[in-house]
Image (cartoon, helix red, strand yellow):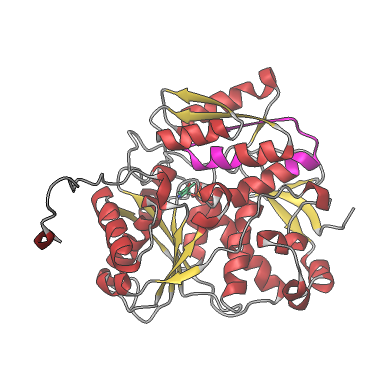
Amino acid sequence: MTETFVSHLECSLTGKRYEARQVHGLSDAGRPLLVRYDLEKMGRAFTKVDLAATREPGFWRYAPMLPVERPENRVSLGEVVTPLIPLQRSAAALGGRPGKAIVKDEGRLPTGSFKARGLCLAVSMAKEFGLQHLAIPTNGNAGAAMAAYASRAGLRSTVFCPDDTPEINVREIQQLGAQTWLVNGLINDCGKIVGGGKEAVGWFDVSTLKEPYRIEGKKTMGLELAEQMGWKLPDAILYPTGGGTGLIGMWKAFQELLALGWIEGHLPRMIAVQAEGCAPIVEAWKSGAEHAPLWENAHTVAAGIRVPIAVGDFLIIRAVRESNGFCMAVSDDDIMAARDLVAREDGLLLCPEGAATAVAYQTALETGQISQDETVVLYNCATGLKYPMAPVERTINRFQPVAYDMF
Ligand SMILES: *Cc1c(COP(=O)(O)O)cnc(C)c1O
């Protein structure tokens, strides 16, 4: 057994302490639990030099900053350090300066999305605790990542998707070994079915923020970004926000890195981007509220951020406020136009959720909320290949002479 530096778990709302090394879901207050570490001890035992020397691939290089105790419980499918790709021509077309907007391309992770980070950790911890059967509600990517890591770990998985989840995601989940169900509702309706089966079926609920470890997995986005950028963080991070695990996880990473003394100075402004058809966090933030009520009739092409209600709403809003950031809603038409632009001008196929951050960048440059001098990171959370694209309509009949003047 290797040592971890976990000291305890803590209710994110009330601060109440919970024992580590026990299975937990939400706190008694019904809110997410955060993993807390003895950072002084961690800082003495694990340094930047140790990190630079590690041979662990992908985000497992941060294993000493994570909660998994036994190395054999680190479930792995070949995670990689995802690249930072500065936008060139498309940055200029968005109104910025080439190179100032950098895409963190998370589509290169196993199952093609950054959900791999959170679910890899959640499944590794489930394995450590000896859990047998995991269940999750999903708009697609979380279910695929859970199915993949659960199968890899030899655990059973059951997944519930809204019945309008894109076919490719639903089939991927089933193919990866999960018993997969379509539900005539939204992700929160699927979540109710998962919650209702905890007693009856005995599965473990891996819903967004309803167990403590997906945040720790998403925290590696913040650790990785800091290391990649030479421990100098960007001026702003634009994050397509659904349940908010990534934004909360990165903010937690930055606090831990500050406490360790690995970074200093200003933290990035955290900018939560949502779709106009599902913008509960944006509305709550605008009205000065801490919590966001359920968004009725949620709809957007960016399925990953179609989350009508989030248990971690107040954590997202706090991170945005503490970082001096803001929230913005963008339209589906603008999202699709930005996806086309970045693909055409820079050869990078964003997912709609990633494209939403490009729209927010463009709008924020126009309103002056972001300046051209600032370095910003846009999160492309999934591979663009999982989403519908326009069909090709040009055809050539090889039995006819080719009219070369048409090219
Ligand atoms: C899940 C998901 C999001 C939202 O991530 P959260 O951290 O839950 O807010 C954004 N984009 C894609 C593609 C996703 O799968």
Q: For the C terminus, which image quadrant?
A: bottom left
**Along the line of sight, the residue nearer the viewer: 127 or 19:** 127
Residue 30 seen in the current view: no
**Residue 78 shown left or right of residue 384 in the figure:** right
Please say if 270 is above or below 157: below
Place of residue 80 in the rendered image (x, y in percent of width and height, measured from the top left):
61, 60
* Above-or-below relation of 356 to 175: below
Residue 393 picture quarter: top left
- Asked whether 395 or 138 is in front, the reply is 395
The residue positioned 71% from the left and 64% from the top of the image is: 61
Residue 187 in sight here: yes
Q: Is residue 207 left or right of residue 402?
A: right
Question: Horizontal and vertical percent for residue 107?
Answer: 49, 55
Image-quadrant location for residue 280: top left
Over which residues does the magenta segment extend? 125-146
Nearest the eye: 210 or 78: 78
Name of the residue lying farthest toward the top: 200
